[in-house]
Amino acid sequence: MGSWGCPHEIDRVCSKVKQSPCDPGMKGCVLAGRYFFTDSDEKNRRLRVKKERETTSGGMLDAVK
């Protein structure tokens, strides 16, 4: 079984998000919107929006006019 560690977590506290208890995928977390979390649909909302945007734009960024 493998594991990983967040570089912003120090003694179960997030040093990036206002010294909050570490909760991977929470708002402000560097993992939010990048990975799928099985424990919370709320954490996956940003990822779903991002994937939907990529699908509707064909995976390309909109051109700046």
Image: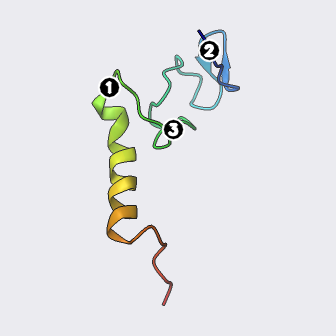
State the residue lying farthest toward the bottom: 65
State the residue lying farthest toward the left: 41
> Which quadrant is the N terminus positioned in?
top right
Which tag, 1 or 3, sits closer to the chain's start?
Answer: 3
Measured Cα–Cα span from mark 1 to mark 3? 15 Å
The image's mark for residue 40 is 1
Q: Disc 2 marks which residue? A: 3
The image's mark for residue 54 is none
Which amino acid, mark 1?
Ser
> Could you tell me which residue is drawn at 67 percent across and 26 percent down?
8
**Quadrant of residue 59 within the rendered picture:** bottom left
Q: Measured from the top left, where is residue 23 in percent x and y?
A: 48, 21
Q: Measured from the top left, where is residue 15 in percent x and y?
A: 65, 25
Q: Disc 3 marks which residue? A: 28
Which amino acid, mark 3?
Gly
Which tag, 1 or 2, sits closer to the chain's start?
Answer: 2
